Image (tube, helix red, strand yellow):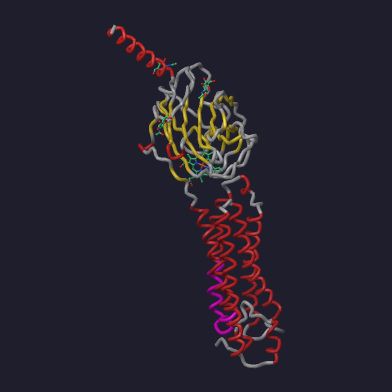
Amino acid sequence: MASSLRWLVLYLISQLHLVLAQINASNIFIPEANTIIAINLPDDGSNDINFYVSSPDWYQYSAIGFGSSMANSLMLVMYPSADRKSVTVSPRFTNGNTEPTHRPVRITLHPGTELTTQMTANGTCHSCRNLQAAPFNPSIPANSPTAPVMFAVGPSSGAFSSDDLDARIRRHVAHGIFNIDVFKSTGSGGVGTPTNVTQHVTFPDGDSSLKKSSNKAATAHGILFAIAALAIAPFDTLVAAFLGRRWPKLHIASGSIYFLFVLGAMVPGIVISGQHVLTATMGTGHQVLGLLTVAVMVVMVGWGFVVRKKAGGQEVAGKGGWMKQVHAWGGRGIWVALLVNNGLGLKLSEQTRLLMLGYAVLAGGVFVFLIPIYFCLWRCTSARKPKTAEEDHELYNMPSIYDHEARFGYGRQ
Ligand code: HEM
Ligand SMILES: *[C@@H]1O[C@H](CO)[C@@H](O)[C@H](O)[C@H]1NC(C)=O
Ligand SMILES: *[C@@H]1O[C@H](CO)[C@@H](O)[C@H](O)[C@H]1NC(C)=O
Ligand SMILES: *[C@@H]1O[C@H](CO)[C@@H](O)[C@H](O)[C@H]1NC(C)=O
């Protein structure tokens, strides 16, 4: 009796072994993203790839890609379907580190594809191992014992769902690369029922961790423009209005720093514009207003030098001359445009409400803080001025940018 039980146990173990052996698939569990990915290469001569991806639905999307860099690799991007009952799997392509766009590659989805708190795709990508249509790189390189597979998840973005295979997606918040064992992934059993185990995969440099996708250029762009609008612009306005009379070179210095700072802050913005389809043509409100503002700034800087040259130690007709007034009001307009455009930028990058509110409070705070200073300085400077007939009109003549000494005879010797 004992001996037959022993045989039964041994028999069951051998059967279990057979069941497990039939699943010839690479399987990876990524705990940081609670994601399971499995890849199987059917050995029926079809060049198909069976794939299974399961990620939490709070990500805008979960994607795999066949290759070790985004450029020219076939990527499969999964997001909740419009009715939020299933998922959409969109085959995509890009030739750089930019938002991939849809390409017509045939995908079939099998039972097990669903949307719960996880979005799960259980599908087949047809003839995908070596897509004949250039410019895709071969997904599974021929005669290589391993094949690299990429993984990326999109930012959490309020219940995004779509049936559109070319829906716009945002840059990932995390990504990773692993290598599947091609031999151990080949077989007729499909992906089976993938679980949270990692097998038949290796990691480049032995590093299995998920990488956070840093977005340094976008962060730098935002912070630099915040500094420009909240600190440098008001500083330069004060310098121009009050110190510019006595020391016009101060405003030339502060204004140049301001101008160069804005140009520098714009550079990373232009770089990241190329990353998404929506922004690549420079058509969003934030980009248009930003470029316009910088263009006006270029004109105003040039204008300032013209005004200075024209004045040449002599008074231009009227209160500093209309040319000075244009320069001064242009400067104020640029400042307001920068403040507003920073808000548009925060909106474009879908920042949290808290951050946008924080920015609005800071921007408002700068005004509240500056108005008394502005008023006080204005009183002080008008009190020290030699009396002229013009003083009667002082109320209408708020201090203007580049309102330099010529008017009051503080000579530039
Ligand atoms: C809007 C869409 C996307 C944008 C704008 C984007 C942008 C970028 C950028 C700029 C990088 C360079 C590294 C970095 O700065 O963090 C990168 C790397 C990477 N991306 Fe994307 N990506 C997008 C979608 C995808 C998708 C769908 C996948 C699919 C798996 C993916 C996988 C990867 C991987 C694995 C890396 C690291 C590989 C390397 O270092 O070359 N990306 N991406
Ligand atoms: C995935 O699809 C295959 C083929 O239809 C099926 O055999 C398998 O059981 C499915 N896996 C899951 C987890 O539903
Ligand atoms: C799985 O791979 C093993 C070799 O590793 C092979 O003997 C077996 O036939 C394969 N299973 C299937 C279902 O193809
Ligand atoms: C994997 O799943 C099993 C069963 O669902 C669970 O008991 C186990 O804790 C999980 N392991 C990890 C690392 O999440």
Number of marks present in the image shown? 0
Ligand 4 picture quarter: top left
Q: Quadrant of residue 368?
A: bottom right
Image-based side of 408 in relation to 17, left or right: right
- Considering the whole magenta stretch, tell me its main secondary structure: helix
Which x, y percent locates residue 25?
44, 24
Which x, y percent locates residue 120?
53, 31
Q: Quadrant of residue 410?
A: bottom right
Which x, y percent locates residue 379?
61, 85
Residue 260 located within the stretch drawn in magenta: no
Residue 189 against residue 163 in the figure, above or below: above
Residue at the location (62% across, 68% down)?
335
Quadrant where the C terminus is found in the figure: bottom right
Residue at the location (60% across, 41% down)?
160
Residue 324 against residue 386 in the figure, above or below: above
Image-based side of 91 in relation to 330, left or right: left
Query: Toward the viewer: 111 or 92?
Result: 111
Quadrant where the N terminus is found in the figure: top left
Q: Residue furthest bottom?
A: 387
Which x, y percent locates residue 24?
43, 21
Q: Residue furthest left?
A: 3
Residue at the location (59% across, 24% down)?
108
Query: Toward the viewer: 239 or 145?
Result: 239
Magenta part of the chain: 241-259
Residue 258 located within the stretch drawn in magenta: yes
Query: Toward the viewer: 378 or 299?
Result: 378
Query: Toward the viewer: 347 or 7?
Result: 7
